[in-house]
Image (spheres, helix red, strand yellow):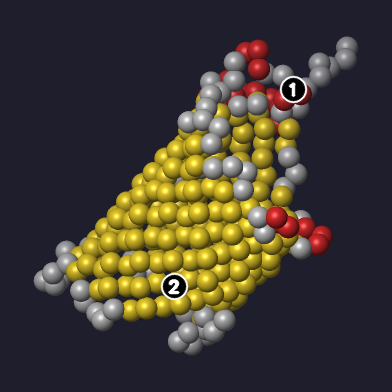
Amino acid sequence: MPHPARPHPIKFAAALLALATGAAGADDIQPSMYSLLPTNFSGSSHTLPGESREARLSGERSLILSPRFQWLTATDLSRTRLEQPFPVRAQSLTLSTGPRIKLGNAELALPFNTGRDASSLGAESTWSGGAPRMTVALGPNDRIKLEARLTSRSGQLSNRRNRTATVSWRHKFNERWALTTGVRQARETDAVDMAITSTAETFASVEAALQGGWRWSLASSLSDSIYGSGLTNEAAHRDRSASLSLSTRYPLHGGWWISGELRAKQTWSEAEAPLASQSGGLKLFRNF
């Protein structure tokens, strides 16, 4: 007697997952809808003259379970060489995985992130957390994004926990010009020295897609941070900062892109003298 045909494991698991989450109805479960897209790799190198050099390799894979439900997995490996005040090498490995669901005019992503960082100074840390975000289309030209992030990082001398909430609005004037603005609130605590950092930030950017493939972005931000500790008698102090950056990107041949950025930042601190910094760099990257 012939044995019954076994279901394909990926298609069978996808159907179970879609049923468990309620992302697809019974009529949506069709084998033709499930597909595992090829991994999209991208590599880049980034140089800030006299400050740092960075090389990065990223990969992203999508498992499409239905027109409204996907499972995304991304990996990122980076190596950095810091030049000041003396050369330091650091490397980082990051993994992100989770579903992305379309709900009418809204899109919900629920990734889980984890990673490990190490440096030539012997410092190592591991971290993990979630970063749910929802994007709601208010019309053809307006989108609202709500994002929350909770991260726990453990190292040899610290055990930090970070919570961040962001609300932003993006408006497209036309196919070439767009405006993004928003606010961000962050709070970080360290269980070892009981340090607490609270930061409030407002940001805005104007983006332009010009003829010839040029893309430009002018961004600015204002932040207010309060630092305190439960183990010392020192009073909490406040830092305020303002930054302005101009970046551009241009497509080259063979899928290569080149981008550049100029950035200026001014910090006013209650504990130290005002500090001004300027930086700039070039980045070369492509998708493979």
Residue 5 in percent (x, y) is at 81, 19
> Residue most toward the right?
1
The mark lying in front, picked from 2 and 1, is 2
Q: Can residue 162 be seen? A: no
Direction from residue 152 to residue 60 in the image, left or right: right
Residue 20 in percent (x, y) is at 54, 23
Q: Which residue is mark 1?
A: 31
> Residue most toward the left?
233
Q: Characterize the local packing of mark 2: few (<14), some (14-19) or many (20 or more) Cα atoms within 10 angstroms.
A: some
Residues under numbered marks 2 and 1 in contact, where contact means CB atoms less than 8 Å apart: no
Helix, strand or loop status at disc 1:
helix
Q: Amino acid at mark 2?
A: Ala
Q: Residue at x 45, y 52 (%)?
A: 128
Q: Can residue 239 be seen? A: yes
Q: Is residue 70 above or below residue 207?
A: above
Q: Residue at x 72, y 37 (%)?
A: 36
Q: Quadrant of the C terminus?
A: bottom right
Residue 62 in percent (x, y) is at 66, 40
In front here: 90 or 247?
Answer: 247
Q: Which residue is mark 2?
A: 264
